[in-house]
């Protein structure tokens, strides 16, 4: 496999209880034209043992200290060789064993700049709870994110050639900034009208929700202006 269709990147730290479901979903995929990159932040629990015993053989496995989640993502991004990128954090999982095949089919048939889809929220026991509150639009553009992050980071797959490093001055919402930057240079985005990922409800951003919202506000003012951002946040309160 000279050029994988998809580069899947998982960043983790002390994730021995969460990463098993992620690895299981990778192992079950019917489509094998992907590479799998794991960036571990020098876990002190048995995360690495869980990985080695999972039956999944990562293309790259790095375990070393980092400067935060987006620094770790940048390490994975630098190693990626696939046509499209997918960030699947520890605890998150691919929705079904056919998910990567569906993505690969869209990539081959339409060759869009971004492939995106819906997200299912699950609990720690992997029980389905609900769809993500913000749902992906039928047409996705840079201006779509005026209404918030309508597409979950894990369900947003851009072409690697369009992806720039995450801006690590943002600790909680660099993924929002990253998606808007990519959409700013994208001409064609194709929706997969189904769930792509299961998102674990208690993620790092969820635990730091207020800080994340403040960062997102700052980012939105940069791209959309202060007046529009204030107006949209008033609308968010009613939403």
Image (cartoon, rainbow, N blue to C red):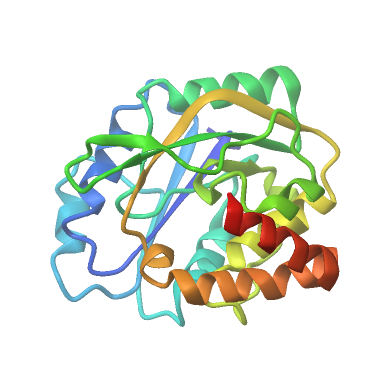
Q: Is residue 25 left or right of residue 49?
A: right
Residue at 41% from the left image edge and 73% from the top image edge: 208
Name the foreground residue: 72 vs 143. 143
Residue at the image position 65 percent from the left and 54 percent from the top: 148
In this rendering, is residue 168 above or below 8?
below
The x, y position of residue 115, in whole percent, is 65, 34
- The spot of residue 75 in percent (x, y) is 52, 67
Q: Nearer the viewer, residue 211 or 184?
A: 211
The picture quadrant where one finds residue 23 is top left
Residue at image location 43% in from the left, 49% down from the top: 88
| Residue 164 image-quadrant placement | bottom right
* Closest to the observer, 139 or 184: 139
Q: Is residue 117 left or right of residue 43?
A: right
24 sits left or right of 4 in the view: left
Indicate the position of residue 100 as horizontal and vertical percent values: 47, 28
Residue name at image x 57 percent, y 59 percent: 77
């Amino acid at each position: 496999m000279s050029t994988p269709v998809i580069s899947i990147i998982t960043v983790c730290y002390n994730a021995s209880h969460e990463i098993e479901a992620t690895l299981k979903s990778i192992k079950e995929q019917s489509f094998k034209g992907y590479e799998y990159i794991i960036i571990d932040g020098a876990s002190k629990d048995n995360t690495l043992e869980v990985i080695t015993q999972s039956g999944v053989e990562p293309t790259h496995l790095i375990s070393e200290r980092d400067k935060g989640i987006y620094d770790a993502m940048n390490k994975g991004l630098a190693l990626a060789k696939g046509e499209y990128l997918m960030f699947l954090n520890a605890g998150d999982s691919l929705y079904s064993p056919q998910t990567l095949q569906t993505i690969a089919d869209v990539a081959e048939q339409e060759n869009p700049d971004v492939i995106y889809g819906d997200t299912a929220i699950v609990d720690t026991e992997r029980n389905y709870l609900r769809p993500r509150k913000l749902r992906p639009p039928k047409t996705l553009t840079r201006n779509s994110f005026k209404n918030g992050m309508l597409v979950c980071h894990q369900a947003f797959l851009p072409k690697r050639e369009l992806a720039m490093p995450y801006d690590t001055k943002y600790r909680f919402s660099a993924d929002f900034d990253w998606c808007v930057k990519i959409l700013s240079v994208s001409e064609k985005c194709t929706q997969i009208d189904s769930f792509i990922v299961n998102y674990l409800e208690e993620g790092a951003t969820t635990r730091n929700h207020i800080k994340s919202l403040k960062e997102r506000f700052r980012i939105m003012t940069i791209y959309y202006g202060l007046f529009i951002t204030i107006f949209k946040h008033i609308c968010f309160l009613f939403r």
